[in-house]
Image: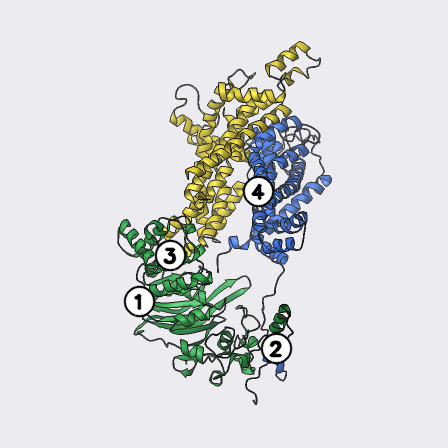
Chain colours: A green, B blue, C yellow
């Protein structure tokens, strides 16, 4: 059973992505960056996409925006309000970008043009889609800066990006995304490049943007903590494919794919009474050139069996129709904890006590 | 299965499936890892024109340094064939004194390549050490050293070289003086690039690490900074060498370069400038050799740039 | 911005002063205005030698001579003695006027050509157009200036013959007799040398512009500009080109000295009475103060252009201004 079977009308779905594939020809062969991603987004819904770098999260979002380099080969379907976006010309897409789908990028230090004032870059976004005068656009730019809590917005609007801190710059980019009341905001790792101390401010601004515009949001991150706090649903990606999708509580409470279990196990948790060891996933993601058949997680998977080498599993229904996982053993993985599957690092504790000058305690 | 969830860490199951008679599937990176040097060579080989140019340049070297000894005429020999157009006997024709143009072109090519090599070695050595010192110590020393470089860059090379070349160009080792002058006026370009690279490199962790381990300044500069700046320096030097060859020909043209009885490609073109219409071979053949040499070097430089700095040329994937 | 401008100006002045001293040192050590007295068989009478040495201030020590020379120019507008029968000051500025026509026209054309070619190459990277333009660029980069000049001169003569009348003038910077110095007269003399100089100068700039354009096109802020929904044209002009052109200013200013060098060669081919002829004749005649004047004027122009480039850069790139 596949997610989001294509229908003539997408109903109340704002955005439907259907079997999206993206590949890049390189000197070494074709890189299969995205290998069939399907999901949909309801009005005002927040979908978190998590995965390691190289899992195809960012490429998926750039494919939706039509911002991939020319060398990229894109197939599948992206529909906004039931209208097909793939295959449209750049000129047609530019009418949608920023107006109906806005995007926030990872690195605020390089996202803004260094030679134009902040206000000008904001006003430019306004004037790209609204028929207003320069001074009206400027006023709107100042208003947007206010919305994302930039102090002295009128003076600040005349300043250049290098006079803003990283967190402030990211808030400016968020303000830019709000400029035209989009229906979908894609935030690609919006807090990754920032200090932990300013991440909260940026997340607040992001929440504000979503409330003000009523937009649905795709929140791409590898920070599971951010997703837990913000998202309604979560999509976990591995090697260019979704491996688990479902409501946030189901994913965190009852994950059904060993990769998701491993990801959660490598995260310190505050909500459990007894202390838990962190369980890292060893190995690294596979090269996306010439992927062998079978499940790409197999080499790192403690649960792997012969069938995993032979056949790549599709998404199957697990705890509910909304919660699906791509694992041959998805239905057997209930109540499995990360430390049941993955080995905790015991060496660290010995090393730690060594450093601290204590007698190494027995690992048991 | 009795134990459905064995906690055995990471163990690929295919190790435990020897009963299957299929070949184990290659799961790790199928793209072989490459050393940095091999990657540079591979990327260079990708630049077809650069590879072709390298071949052409090597052939020109062989032709100029070895070929001259085997060619039936000497560049100083006056044959009885005056102002002949190209033939089997004289592939590039002869001038009004009966000198075989091919022999003269070979000699000129040799001079050009000698000057190119000399400038490459000398200005790279001086420029990179100078630039590395300025960038490494920064502060007042850097300011003073870079002011000196700025000073050099304000002089038009040809003008200074003409002033100096007038005194030395006609001597027996004229080409060497020309080469020294050009090198003396071009090393500041190398030092500028070197300083820029060193300024950014010295903040890198490996330099910090070397310093923490107690390496001397001298060791850090020569073992860590200069080798790591090789890419940009090599690229700069190829551009400089191309410029050096053109400068030599220009100097010969205005009368302050290599002089009779020696010869150079620039001198040959100069002597032929009134004969473009009547004896075009005298003008075109030496000119084409200059272009061939300089063009090859420029393409090699472009290939090296691609090889050392792929981020500059590749579109983001 | 004002403080920055003052700072740059104050830094340029010592550079200029030291450079005058260095060129004086070079000319004093490598040139000998009395050399014409020697080499005619019998040694010249000591009285004549002393007279000539006095005429060219050689009886003074190096430092007083430098002081004499530099204060003469700055305070009295006197550029020193010459045996070419002209006032060096007057002569060099009339020559500079001739040469600057060529240099400025060529630089403007080269800059425009470089921007167009660089942008097209970058936007159509790895296309046939890019490869063709790149190859042409490398070819011009590899041409000796005088070879191209001679070639174009010959082509001009042939074209004149086939047109049946003089379209291009290939000798001198202007004609003689009536109509000399008129706009059309100067233009017809200017065309071929300007094309020569522009073609050999534009190539390296267009390569540079292509590189900086590619770097900008791959930058995050271009991606964000596109994500805002700006039209491709707006992104290219307002964001990409605007930013990519800034570093070009420095490169062009640094090349001024080289262009002066190429202008010397080009002028020689077309037999202009410009700075090139002035320099070469003065070196041949060992006219020390004339050569010094040439180097001083050229050095001053180079330093001035670099100063202007610095200021322009700061004006266009807000990051520099506040350093």
Which chain letter goes with mark 2?
Answer: B
* Helix, strand or loop at mark 1: loop
Q: Which mark is residue B139?
A: 4
Q: Dot 4: few (<14), some (14–19), or many (≥20) neighbours within 10 Å?
A: few
In this rendering, which labeled residue sits more in front, label 3 or label 4?
4
- Is residue C160 visible in the rendered image? The answer is no
What whole-number distance in Å separates the C-alpha atoms at marks 2 and 3?
Answer: 52 Å
Check disc 2 and report the residue beneath it: B24
Q: Position of residue B60 (x, y in %)?
A: 65, 44
Residue at numbered disc 1: A214
Q: x%, y% of residue C48?
A: 65, 10
> With C181 as the anchor, is B56 left or right in this view?
right
| Percent of width and height locating residue C28 | 62, 23
**Residue B170, labelled with which disc?**
none
Q: Report the front residue among A309 and C295.
A: C295
**Residue at position x 68%, y 17% in the image:** C39
Sequence-first disc among 2 and 4:
2
In 3D space, how far apart are the residues under numbered discs 1 and 4 (Cα atoms)?
Answer: 55 Å
Badge number at residue A172: 3
Under tag 3, what secondary structure? Answer: helix
Residue C26: x and y in percent read 61, 27
Do the residues marked 1 and 4 share a common chain?
Answer: no
Would you say residue A14 is visible in this rendering? yes
**Local crowd size for mark 2, using a 10 Å CA cut-off: few (<14), some (14–19), many (≥20):** few
Q: Nearer the viewer, mark 1 or mark 4?
A: 4
Q: For the view shown, which residue lies furthest in the right direction?
A: B69
What is the chain letter for disc 1?
Answer: A
Q: CA distance from mark 2 to mark 4?
A: 60 Å
């Amino acid at each position: 059973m596949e997610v989001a079977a294509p229908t003539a009308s997408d109903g109340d779905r704002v955005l439907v992505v259907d079997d999206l594939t993206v590949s890049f020809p390189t000197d070494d062969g074709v890189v299969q960056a995205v290998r069939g991603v399907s999901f949909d987004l309801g009005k005002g819904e927040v979908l978190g996409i998590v995965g390691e770098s190289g899992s195809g999260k960012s490429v998926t979002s750039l494919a939706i925006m039509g911002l991939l380099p020319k060398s990229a080969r894109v197939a599948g379907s992206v529909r906004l309000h039931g209208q097909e976006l793939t295959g449209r010309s750049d000129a047609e897409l530019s009418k949608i970008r920023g107006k109906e789908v806005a995007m926030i990028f990872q690195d605020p230090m390089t996202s803004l043009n260094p030679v134009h004032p902040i206000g000008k870059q904001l006003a430019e976004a306004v004037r790209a889609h609204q028929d207003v005068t320069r001074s009206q656009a400027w006023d709107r730019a100042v208003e947007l800066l206010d919305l994302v809590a930039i102090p002295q917005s009128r003076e600040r609007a005349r300043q250049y990006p290098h006079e803003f801190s990283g967190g402030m710059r990211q808030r400016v980019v968020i303000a830019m995304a709000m400029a035209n009341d989009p229906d979908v905001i894609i935030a690609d790792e919006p807090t990754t490049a920032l200090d932990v101390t300013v991440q909260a401010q940026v997340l607040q601004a992001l929440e504000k943007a979503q409330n003000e515009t009523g937009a649905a949001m795709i929140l791409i991150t590898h920070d599971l903590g951010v997703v837990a706090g913000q998202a309604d649903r979560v999509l976990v990606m591995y090697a260019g494919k979704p491996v688990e999708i479902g409501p946030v509580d189901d994913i965190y409470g009852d994950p059904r794919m060993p990769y998701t279990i491993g990801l959660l196990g490598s995260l310190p948790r505050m909500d459990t009474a007894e202390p838990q060891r962190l369980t890292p996933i060893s190995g690294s993601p596979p090269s996306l050139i010439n992927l062998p058949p079978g499940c790409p997680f197999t080499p790192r998977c403690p649960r792997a069996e012969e069938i995993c080498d032979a056949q790549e599993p599709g998404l199957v229904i697990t705890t509910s129709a909304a919660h699906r996982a791509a694992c041959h053993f998805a239905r057997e993985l209930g109540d499995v904890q990360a430390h049941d599957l993955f080995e905790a690092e015991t060496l660290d504790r010995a090393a730690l006590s060594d450093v601290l000058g204590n007698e190494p305690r027995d690992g048991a | 299965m009795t134990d459905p969830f064995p906690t055995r860490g990471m163990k690929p199951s295919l190790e435990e499936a020897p009963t299957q008679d299929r070949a184990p599937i290659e799961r790790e990176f199928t793209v072989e890892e490459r050393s940095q040097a091999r990657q540079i060579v591979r990327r260079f080989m990708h630049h077809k024109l650069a590879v072709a140019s390298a071949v052409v340049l090597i052939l020109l070297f062989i032709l100029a340094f070895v070929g001259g000894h085997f060619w039936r005429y000497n560049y100083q020999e006056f044959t009885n064939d005056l102002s002949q157009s190209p033939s089997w006997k004289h592939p590039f024709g002869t001038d009004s004194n009966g000198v075989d143009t091919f022999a003269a072109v070979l000699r000129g090519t040799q001079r050009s390549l000698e000057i190119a090599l000399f400038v490459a070695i000398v200005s790279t050595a001086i420029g990179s050490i100078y630039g590395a010192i300025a960038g490494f110590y920064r502060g007042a020393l850097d300011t003073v050293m870079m002011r000196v470089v700025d000073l050099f860059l304000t002089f038009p090379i040809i003008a200074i070289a003409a002033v100096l070349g007038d005194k030395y160009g006609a001597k027996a080792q004229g080409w060497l003086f020309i080469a020294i002058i050009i090198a003396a006026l071009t090393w500041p370009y190398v030092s500028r690039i070197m300083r820029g690279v060193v300024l950014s490199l010295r903040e890198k962790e490996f330099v910090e690490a070397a310093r923490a381990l107690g390496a001397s300044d001298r060791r850090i500069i020569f073992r860590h900074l200069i080798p790591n700046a090789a890419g940009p320096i090599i690229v700069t030097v190829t551009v400089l060498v191309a410029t050096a060859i053109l400068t030599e020909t220009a100097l010969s043209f205005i009368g302050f370069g290599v002089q009779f009885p020696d010869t150079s490609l620039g001198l040959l073109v100069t002597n032929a400038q009134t004969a473009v219409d009547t004896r075009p071979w005298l003008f075109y053949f030496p000119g084409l050799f200059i272009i061939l040499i300089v063009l090859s070097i420029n393409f090699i430089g472009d290939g090296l740039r691609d090889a050392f700095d792929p981020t500059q040329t590749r579109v983001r994937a | 911005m004002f403080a920055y401008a003052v700072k740059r100006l104050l830094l340029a002045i010592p550079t200029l002063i030291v450079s005058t001293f260095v060129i004086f040192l070079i000319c004093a050590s490598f040139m000998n205005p009395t050399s014409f007295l020697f080499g005619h068989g019998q040694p010249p009478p000591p009285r004549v030698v002393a007279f000539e040495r006095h005429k060219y201030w050689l009886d003074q020590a190096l430092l007083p001579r430098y002081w004499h020379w530099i204060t003469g120019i700055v305070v009295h507008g006197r550029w020193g003695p010459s045996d070419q029968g002209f006032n060096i000051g007057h002569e060099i500025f009339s020559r500079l006027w001739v040469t600057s026509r060529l240099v400025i026209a060529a630089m403007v054309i080269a800059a425009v050509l470089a921007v167009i070619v660089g942008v097209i190459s970058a936007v159509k990277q790895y296309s046939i157009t890019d490869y063709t333009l790149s190859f042409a660029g490398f070819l011009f980069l590899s041409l000796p200036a005088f070879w191209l000049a001679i070639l174009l001169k010959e082509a001009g003569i042939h074209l004149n013959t086939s047109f049946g009348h003089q379209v291009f003038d290939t000798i001198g910077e202007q004609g003689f007799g009536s109509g000399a110095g008129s706009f059309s007269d100067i233009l017809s003399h200017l065309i071929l040398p300007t094309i020569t100089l522009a073609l050999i100068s534009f190539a390296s700039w267009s390569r540079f512009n292509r590189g900086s354009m590619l770097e900008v096109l791959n930058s995050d802020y271009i991606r964000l500009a596109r994500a805002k929904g700006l039209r491709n044209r707006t992104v290219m002009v307002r964001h990409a080109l605007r930013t990519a052109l800034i570093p070009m200013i420095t490169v062009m200013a640094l090349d001024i000295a080289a262009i002066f060098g190429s202008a010397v060669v080009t002028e020689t081919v077309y037999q202009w009475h410009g700075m090139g002829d002035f320099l070469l004749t003065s070196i041949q005649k060992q006219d020390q103060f004339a050569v010094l004047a040439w180097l001083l004027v050229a050095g001053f122009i180079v330093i001035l252009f670099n100063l202007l480039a610095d200021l322009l850069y700061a004006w266009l790139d807000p990051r520099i201004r506040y350093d």
